[in-house]
């Protein structure tokens, strides 16, 4: 395994201290290695060393004035009023992934973006969820990343339309696979007795495809979709 591959893998796993060490070694070999500079800057950002991170991003801009990664992150620095201190930032990242039955779920995205986009995703990055007709698209800084599986999207759409609120973060990412962590922040009063996520796969709500016997929850959701959502009425 090459040093570059090791550096990428450590970042994907969230091993930021080792990522710093490996990317420093790459930069020692080639001070103009833009990818290594960006990775090192990200690792410094996550561990709370904002000064070093900003300096590295500025160095990248000096080498490549149109570098999208550096420009985007420098803009984020300007938008932030404060940066977590070293150690505290790592705690924040870890706290994002605290699991709560019924309120959190790790989901593997489908129809993901091209590798040059997904490979730049890093553990802990905040993601946006947006509803478009009967799907939920996932993006990072307005850049499409992928979409939720239909069974999970179908369930969350009802909750979101009723007022539930969710946060999403990158859990892990590679060229051909992106997993995200979704967390319920606010529960719609209308569905206060229903968990956002079930322990069984949402697709298992359908007991028997041949006999078309479905659970009471699924039947109710489907009925409400047909009665209230114009998108369903358009398709009929």
Image: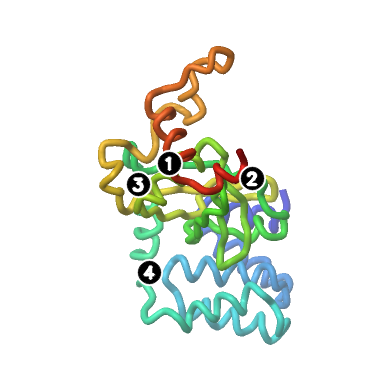
Report the Cα–Cα distance between label 2 and label 3.
22 Å
- Badge 1 marks a residue whose secondary structure is strand
Q: Name the front one of labels 3 and 4.
A: 3
- Badge 2 marks a residue whose secondary structure is loop
Q: Name the front one of labels 1 and 4.
A: 1
Horizontal and vertical percent position of residue 83: 38, 75
**Earlier residue among tags 2 and 3:** 3
The circle on residue 91 is none
Q: Residues within 10 Å of mark 4 (few under 14, many from 20)?
A: some
Report the Cα–Cα distance between label 1 and label 4.
28 Å
Horizontal and vertical percent position of residue 181: 46, 48
Asked if residue 22 lies left or right of residue 195, the reply is: right
Q: Name the front one of labels 2 and 1.
A: 1
Asked if residue 87 lies left or right of residue 1, the reply is: left
> Image height check: is 208 above or below 176?
above
> Image height check: is 62 above or below 210?
below
- Residue on which the image places disc 2: 177
- Residue on which the image places disc 3: 98
User: Looking at the image, which is closer to me, 119 or 111?
Assistant: 111
| Residue at image point 54% right, 12% down | 211
- Badge 4 marks a residue whose secondary structure is loop
Instruction: Examine the rendering and report whether any part of residue 15 can be seen.
Output: no
Instruction: Examine the rendering and report whether any part of residue 133 can be seen.
Output: yes
| Number of numbered discs visible in the structure rendering | 4
Q: Do the residues labelled 3 and 1 touch (CB within 8 Å)?
A: no
Report the residue that reaches farthest toward the top.
Answer: 211
User: Looking at the image, which is closer to me, 5 or 176?
Assistant: 176
Report the Cα–Cα distance between label 4 and label 2.
30 Å
Asked if residue 86 lies left or right of residue 208, the reply is: left
- Residue on which the image places disc 4: 86
- Residue on which the image places disc 1: 105
**Earlier residue among tags 3 and 1:** 3
């Amino acid at each position: 395994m090459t040093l570059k591959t090791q550096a990428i893998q450590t970042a994907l796993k969230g091993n930021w201290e080792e990522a710093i060490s490996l990317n420093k070694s790459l930069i020692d070999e080639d001070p103009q290695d833009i990818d290594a500079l960006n990775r090192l800057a990200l690792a410094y950002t996550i561990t709370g060393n904002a000064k070093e991170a900003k300096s590295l991003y500025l160095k990248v801009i000096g080498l490549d004035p149109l570098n999208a990664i550096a420009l985007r992150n420098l803009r984020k620095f300007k938008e932030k009023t404060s940066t977590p201190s070293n150690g505290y930032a790592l705690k924040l990242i870890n706290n994002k992934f605290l699991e709560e039955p019924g309120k959190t779920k790790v989901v593997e995205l489908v129809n993901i973006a091209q590798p040059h986009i997904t490979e730049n995703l890093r553990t802990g990055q905040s993601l946006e969820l947006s509803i478009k007709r009967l799907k939920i698209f996932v993006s990072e800084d307005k850049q499409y990343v992928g979409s939720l599986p239909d069974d999970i999207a179908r369930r969350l759409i009802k909750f979101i339309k009723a007022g539930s609120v969710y946060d999403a973060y990158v859990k892990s990412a590679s060229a051909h696979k992106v997993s995200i962590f979704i967390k319920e922040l606010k529960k719609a009063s209308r569905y206060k007795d229903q968990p956002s996520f079930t322990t069984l796969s949402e697709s298992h709500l359908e007991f028997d495809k041949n006999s078309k016997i479905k659970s009471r929850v699924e039947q109710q959701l489907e009925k409400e979709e047909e009665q209230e959502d114009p998108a369903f009425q358009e398709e009929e």
